[in-house]
Amino acid sequence: MIDWTAFLWSGVLLLLVAVVFWLFSLWRNDVSIVDSLWSLMFLLVALAYAAISGDSGPREVLVLALVAVWALRLSAYISWRNHGEPEDYRYQEIRANNEPGFRYKSFYIVFVLQAVLAWVISLPLAGAISGQPDIGFLDYAGVALFLAGLFFEAVGDLQLSRFRKDPENAGKVLDTGLWRYTRHPNYFGNFTLWWGFYLVALSAGAWWTIVSPLLMTFLLLKVSGVALLEKDIGERRPRYQQYIRRTNAFFPGLPRN
């Protein structure tokens, strides 16, 4: 069973971190920094939960290692990608729709919301750390799924960053590498690795934490992932319409003629 006291305190820690980063966003007048914070929130929850609950074992070490690899890579990549850039256009739109007073509204619209989502989605991490100690087949299956997801996410990000660096690709659409088989390999990778975390939690007996990967899947497909990114991308990049017609949106598959 999850130590709910430890889990509650990990949520309090997330809110405190959200306050700090919100204040920093006021100074920079840029809420995009929350994207760099997002993955680190899960690492903070896992570390706080492990420290407060006092549970230890091979699965705890495994989960902390997996979360650290994913969270640090993703945060470092987003921080590097956004360095020197203006506020992300998605947040500019949110800002425009919530004026006047977005500077202060952003505390709960952006930072508190993401902290709460991260806290709920992190349930499998807490369940895996505090569950049955013996590692079994589902743990190995979860690690395999995690590694597959990390591959899609990291390689997809690398291919996209290289594509964007080449000035000859201005106005073009990346349709090679992993992007040949899915329009969003990084989102698919994120989806896959969170189902990997769930398998580890399932092995620990926390079957009910399935709410986490289901919520993450919904967010990636219908809210902040595919749906949001492609809402107006056809208007900004006309060639993307052809890409849509021949390439799967999410799950990888062979391109269509």
Image (tube, grey):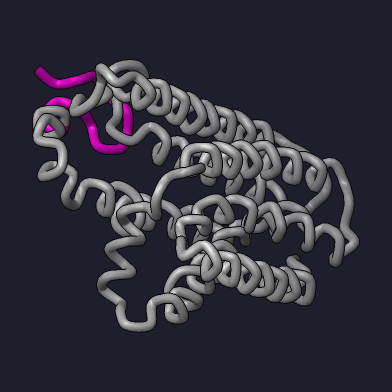
**Residue 201: image location, x then y, percent:** 65, 51
Q: Is residue 62 above or below residue 204?
A: above
Quadrant of residue 52 in the image? bottom right
Determine if the magenta segment contains residue 254.
yes
Start-end of magenta stretch: 244-257
* Image quarter (top left, top right, bottom left or bottom right) of the N terminus: bottom right
**Residue 25: image location, x then y, percent:** 53, 65
Pick the residue in front: 171 or 243. 171
Q: Kindly identify the residue that appears in the image at 44 percent across and 74 percent down.
A: 106
User: In the rendered picture of this protein, how many numbered marks are placed on residues?
Assistant: 0
Left or right position of 68 against 240: right
**Residue 100: image location, x then y, percent:** 32, 82
Pick the residue in front: 202 or 120. 120
Pick the residue in front: 194 or 142. 194
Q: Kindly identify the residue that appears in the image at 10 percent across and 45 percent down.
A: 235
Determine if the magenta segment contains residue 192.
no
Q: Kindly identify the residue that appears in the image at 74 percent across and 66 percent down.
A: 2
Please indicate, yes or no, whether residue 255 appears anywhere in the rendered image. Answer: yes
Left or right position of 113 against 50: left
For the stretch drawn in magenta, the main secondary structure is loop
* Image quarter (top left, top right, bottom left or bottom right) of the C terminus: top left
Q: Kindly identify the residue that appears in the image at 36 percent across and 61 percent down.
A: 91
**Residue 12: image location, x then y, percent:** 70, 75
Left or right position of 152 against 39: left
Please indicate, yes or no, whether residue 120 appears anywhere in the rendered image. Answer: no
